[in-house]
Amino acid sequence: DTGVSQNPRHKITKRGQNVTFRCDPISEHNRLYWYRQTLGQGPEFLTYFQNEAQLEKSRLLSDRFSAERPKGSFSTLEIQRTEQGDSAMYLCASSPPGQMNTGELFFGEGSRLTVL
Amino acid sequence: AQSVTQPDIHITVSEGASLELRCNYSYGATPYLFWYVQSPGQGLQLLLKYFSGDTLVQGIKGFEAEFKRSQSSFNLRKPSVHWSDAAEYFCAVGPDYGGSQGNLIFGKGTKLSVKP
């Protein structure tokens, strides 16, 4: 399968612990996005990378959240000192560069976080 | 503020019946408009998009949508629903892709159930 891959698919953690999610985009896609989706809501934009550069961050991305894409390929989203309000589905998406970009985002299946 | 409203949280239709899902947006500039579908256990998938030109756009799986600037609407339609169309549908608005690339604003979604 050559789609967007996210790991782990499910994570249950205790409040105060740190968690990290990984996203592997479609190989030729240079743009990578993180969204968060809570129950009954649509996805909310968190951050966006073009290659290894983080170009945009939402106000939703508090100091406890950090995202990286060190080599312009996979990305990680780390949440430090988790809170119950962080419980959500974290979605990763990618899109191709330049002329190949039709405006479509290709989403992974998401990583569901439950904070107890 | 930019926003997307999907007035219907849940819609049930009979298989073979027609479908219309409503979407209204608030956006200062000319919007780019999208409909995505999310099936259980699957990532969001693009159904169709509107950037410019013909206001009636065709998408995958027999869906179409009509952009009406005067009503700030982008309603999704299908003439005959299949049981496999049961899913959650999200309308989204985005900026000019020459600028911010992936900061889509999603509605809260409409869950579609299909009766046999």
Image: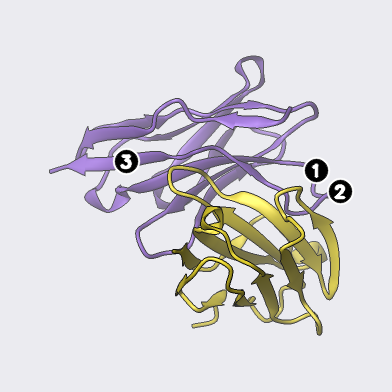
Please provide percent x and percent y for residue B42.
41, 64
Binning the other alpha carbons within 10 Å of mark 1 as few (below 14), some (14 to 19) or many (20 upward) gives some
Counting every numbered tag in the picture gives: 3
Report the residue marked by disc 1. B96
In the figure, is residue A62 to the left or right of B6?
right
Cβ atoms at labels 1 and 2 below 8 Å apart = yes
Q: Is mark 2 on a helix, strand or loop?
A: loop
The subunit letter for the residue under badge 2 reads B
Name the image quarter holding the C terminus of chain A.
bottom left
Above or below B93: residue B70:
above
**Amino acid under label 3?**
Leu
Cβ atoms at labels 1 and 3 below 8 Å apart = no
Q: Residue at x 64, y 76 (%)?
A: A25
Q: Earlier in the sequence, mark 2 or mark 3?
A: 2
Please provide percent x and percent y for residue A104.
64, 56
| Residue B96 visible to an observer of this rendering | yes
Binning the other alpha carbons within 10 Å of mark 2 as few (below 14), some (14 to 19) or many (20 upward) gives few
Report the residue marked by disc 2. B99
Q: Nearer the viewer, residue A110 or B102?
A: A110
Report the residue marked by disc 3. B112
**Amino acid under label 2?**
Gly
The mark closer to the camera, 1 or 3, is 3
**Amino acid under label 1?**
Asp
Chain B colour in the picture: purple
Q: Which residue is drawn at 67% across and 69% down?
A: A80
Please provide percent x and percent y for residue A30.
77, 73
